[in-house]
Amino acid sequence: MAWMTVRKLDHAGRLVTAYPGRVLHRTATSIALETAWERLPLDLGYVVLETGDRWVEFFYADRWYNAFRIHAADGRLKGIYCNITRPAEITATTVSAEDLALDLWIDPQGRLTVLDEDEFAALPLTATERAAAQAARAALERMAAQGTGPWAQEVTQMEEPLEAVVGKLLLQRRMTLAVAESCTGGLVGHRITNVAGSSAYYLGSVTAYAYEAKEALLGVRHATLYEHGAVSAETAQEMAQGVRRALRSDLGLSVTGIAGPDGGTPDKPVGLVYIALAAPDGLWVEQHIWRGDRLANKAASAEAALDLVRRYLTEELAASTAR
């Protein structure tokens, strides 16, 4: 499953935030991504964003807006948030959009609210830019009134979240999973337990942040930590083996890294993450370097960790079927 980094910029092109998104659908001029609200709840007045909400985001290289379809963790539609932006820049690995302050909110009943008109009026835009933005607003208002819009058409192609896919594969293989987390701080376990019935295959996790916790709870060797560091392939492997041993699971998954914004060095930059999987038939470790902020790096690490389990289980299931 392909993933990309979403970069939200202000009207002057300055980075405001960045986070990972999983690609659902792509054309020559547009892309649809699935992302998650992993922050604390935020009450905006017209909607409350809650940890675990699922977002389907639509960006366009030829339109002056983007749209976000927001679902609660149980799948219920909360509404659609539309940003007036300059056309998005969509590359092989990133989506960047410059926000022009003006926003529209469409509730589940189709009622529309226009937001931040004063901020939009104060922006130093050219007459051409302002006219394009106003035309985008009018187009969104028409689609809201008609109950149409590109988001309504493309969202049907949404794939299941990785934690649901992994859960089904674990059930098929009759295998159990335990997780050892450091830089993700419990995010992998949080996502797994968002799936109803996950207790059938998920045994639990150990969030071991400090060296002492990695040694005492996971059995990571003192020499490994002090020779290679907490953020290393060697430590990730021993964490995965340790949590598998401690919880007596079939699979042990681990994540250790530098989420940022501080803590990086020339040899180990911010965003460096190691993910390991210990299984009955082997041990695997991967290195990633993310480029987002702290929350984006944590979210990308959790996504990559779940995807490592998915790939292992998919290959294991295929091999079992072939035997």
Image (cartoon, rainbow, N blue to C red):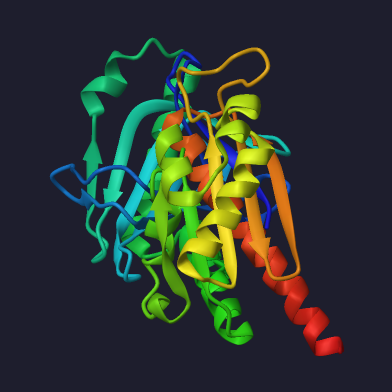
Residue 223: quarter of image: top right
Nearer the observer, 210 or 51: 210
Q: Residue at x 40, y 41 (%)?
A: 213
Residue lying farthest to the top in this orientation: 124
Residue 82 visible in the current orientation: yes
**Percent x, y for residue 74?**
32, 71
Nearer the observer, 208 or 266: 208
- Answer left or right for 124 relative to 170: left
**Percent x, y for residue 219?**
51, 48
**Percent x, y for residue 136?**
44, 39
- Answer left or right for 271 relative to 92: left
Residue lying farthest to the left in this orientation: 45
Q: Residue at x 64, y 34 (%)?
A: 232
Nearer the observer, 282 or 263: 282
- Answer left or right for 235 relative to 164: right
Tell me the quadrant of the picture where the N terminus can be found. Answer: bottom right
Q: Residue at x 43, y 71 (%)?
A: 203
Q: How many marks?
A: 0
Q: Residue at x 45, y 20 (%)?
A: 261
Residue 184 visible in the current orientation: no
